[in-house]
Image: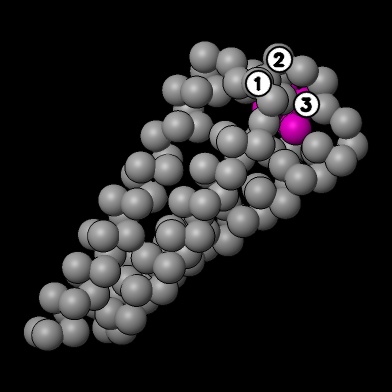
């Protein structure tokens, strides 16, 4: 949604109409989220043969944790839907880092 319809994103999560710069930054974040999804897909495909991908995805998740938190801190307002949708990913990304790193350690020992 951040790439295809940034106006809808800003209406749903902030009840504002974005400027061109805000849309550009949203698309930048969308690019990071897409890269994160790609790394996660590669990890799902490769981790059994090459467990280091678990650590790679943990690192990507860790960087996304800061993207989530900085977005919430930086925006001037969030709708209720914005809070509900954008708050949990930070905690879930932290949990994902822990799970991936523990999985990497277990796979490396085995």
Label 2, label 1: how far apart the Cα atoms are:
8 Å
Q: How many residues crowd around disc 3 within 10 Å: few (fewer than 14), some, or many (20 or more)? A: some
Q: Would you say residue 41 is visible in this rendering?
A: no
Left or right: 108 as drawn, with respect to 47: left
Q: In which quarter of the view is residue 53 placed? A: bottom left
* Magenta region includes residue 103: no
Helix, strand or loop at label 2? It is: loop
Q: Are marks 2 and 1 in contact (CB under 8 Å)?
A: yes
Q: Which mark is residue 13?
A: none
Where's the C terminus, which quadrant? bottom left
Examine the rendered structure and indicate whether residue 107 appears above or below residue 78.
below
Q: How many residues crowd around disc 2 within 10 Å: few (fewer than 14), some, or many (20 or more)? A: some
Examine the rendered structure and indicate whether residue 74 appears above or below residue 78.
below
- Magenta segment boundaries in residue numbering: 5-9
- Mark 1 — residue? 77
- Residue at coordinates 34% horizontally, 44% vertically from top-left? 92
Label 2, label 3: how far apart the Cα atoms are:
10 Å
Looking at marks 2 and 3 on the same chain, the residue that comes earlier in the sequence is marked by 3
Label 3, label 1: how far apart the Cα atoms are:
15 Å
Q: Nearer the viewer, mark 3 or mark 1?
A: 1
- Residue at coordinates 28% horizontally, 64% vertically from top-left? 100
- Mark 2 — residue? 15
Helix, strand or loop at label 1? It is: loop
Left or right: 53 as drawn, with respect to 74: left
Q: Would you say residue 84 is visible in this rendering?
A: yes
- Residue at coordinates 72% horizontally, 51% vertically from top-left? 28
Q: In which quarter of the view is residue 17 placed? A: top right
- Mark 3 — residue? 7
Left or right: 18 as drawn, with respect to 1: right
Helix, strand or loop at label 3? It is: helix
């Amino acid at each position: 949604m951040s790439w295809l319809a940034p106006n809808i994103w800003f209406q749903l999560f902030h009840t504002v109409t974005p400027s061109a710069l805000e849309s550009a930054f949203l698309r930048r974040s969308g690019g990071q989220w897409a890269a994160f999804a790609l790394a996660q897909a590669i990890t799902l495909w490769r981790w059994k043969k090459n467990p280091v991908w678990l650590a790679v995805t943990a690192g990507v998740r860790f960087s996304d944790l800061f993207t989530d938190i900085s977005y919430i801190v930086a925006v001037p307002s969030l709708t209720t839907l914005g809070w509900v949708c954008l708050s949990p990913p930070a905690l879930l990304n932290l949990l994902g880092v822990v799970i991936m790193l523990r999985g990497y350690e277990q796979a490396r020992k085995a």
